[in-house]
Amino acid sequence: MKWRELIKERSSIRSYKDKKVDEKLLEQVRQYMKELSPLIPEQKTEILLLGKEAGPRLEGIVGYMGNAFFAPNYILLLGEGSEEGYIHAGYLAAQLELKLTELKLNTCFLSINEAKAVKTALNISSPLTVTTCISFGHGNPEKDSNRIDIKSRSDVRMEKIKGHIAPKIAMDELVSQSVFGQSCDFAEDAMDPNWEKAFYASSLAPAALNRQTYRFLIEDNMLYLLDREVKHITKEDRYLNDGIVMFYFHTVLTAHFHKPDSWTVGTVEKKPEWKIPEEYFVVGTYRLF
């Protein structure tokens, strides 16, 4: 798949046509569910493909303000209810959502408000925890929107995008060099252009309540993914978002050259010289070269 193009094309759709998804497309989704690239191979995961009958059952227990959107189909991910389990689920869910985008289907991530209630409503007996849900189908058309992409104060671009557009963090706010808040130089002679492509893709990652709480810090050959707690966003949704960001970064970077390793999930001690604010913590590390 052309990951960069799909990431730019993807948008969250919150209203669906009363139209069935062709069975041939659903079969492609089922097959792809078997081909996902794991972030943490030892993590136990189950993925369920559900029909429109799940919509009324999910209403009130998934999605912002309990809105399940009564979509034609849903994908439900179950995993281990740990920090690593939710990050892993986000990594897998990102792949599924982009596959649906490739199939010209519209999607939206739905947060899990009552994990136990979801299992009860859908008669799921698995011992694993419901981690996230993706609604999908043929979306109702939305007006075109303008998105401002700010790479730096001297590089501001306007793009016309179809669908629901969330605010996007500026690149020089997203990525710090050596010291938190110290902007990177994205000039070609200062940074590998493939890094910039991967960071830009990460800036487009969907986030709970459109709050992009994650940040990157580069020190020498190491990249650190940071995140922080904010009001109204659960730690579970935050970890899911981190997993999505990890996939976006890794898949775009490795589309241009072979890199055998991936993210290492887990907190590390912050160095004083990084001057990272107290509320931020390290979610994972990535060896750039």
Image (cartoon, rainbow, N blue to C red):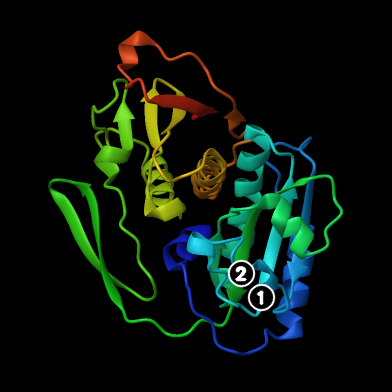
Tell me what residue is drawn at x 74 percent, y 39 percent: 80
Whether 282 is drawn above or below 34: the answer is: above
In the rendered image, which residue does mark 2 sit on?
59
Tell me what residue is drawn at x 36 percent, y 43 percent: 196
Circle 2: residue type: Glu
Q: Position of residue 14 (x, y in %)?
A: 48, 73
Q: Please rate how many residues cluster around mark 2, counting C-alpha atoms within 10 Å: few if below 14, some from 14 to 19, many from 20.
A: some
Along the viewing direction, whichever of 33 and 165 lies nearer the viewer: 165
Quarter of the image where one finds residue 156: bottom left
Along the viewing direction, whichever of 250 and 26 lies nearer the viewer: 26
Q: Position of residue 242 (x, y in %)?
A: 51, 41
Whether 28 is drawn above or below 273: the answer is: below
- Disc 1/disc 2 C-alpha distance (Å): 5 Å
Q: Secondary structure at mark 2?
A: loop
Q: Position of residue 67 (x, y in %)?
A: 53, 68
- Residue lying at the far left of the rendered structure: 154
State whether residue 77 appears in this view.
no
Q: Position of residue 129 (x, y in %)?
A: 74, 46
| Quadrant containing the N terminus in the rendered view | bottom right
In the rendered structure, the answer to whether residue 120 lies left or right of residue 61 reads right
- Residue lying at the far bottom of the rendered structure: 19
Total tally of numbered discs in the picture: 2
Circle 1: residue type: Pro
Along the viewing direction, whichever of 255 and 28 lies nearer the viewer: 28
Tell me what residue is drawn at x 54 percent, y 50 percent: 255
Q: Please rate how many residues cluster around mark 1, counting C-alpha atoms within 10 Å: few if below 14, some from 14 to 19, many from 20.
A: some
Are the residues tagged 1 and 2 within 8 Å (C-beta)?
yes
State whether residue 232 appears in this view.
yes
Q: Secondary structure at mark 1?
A: helix
**Mark sitting on residue 159:** none
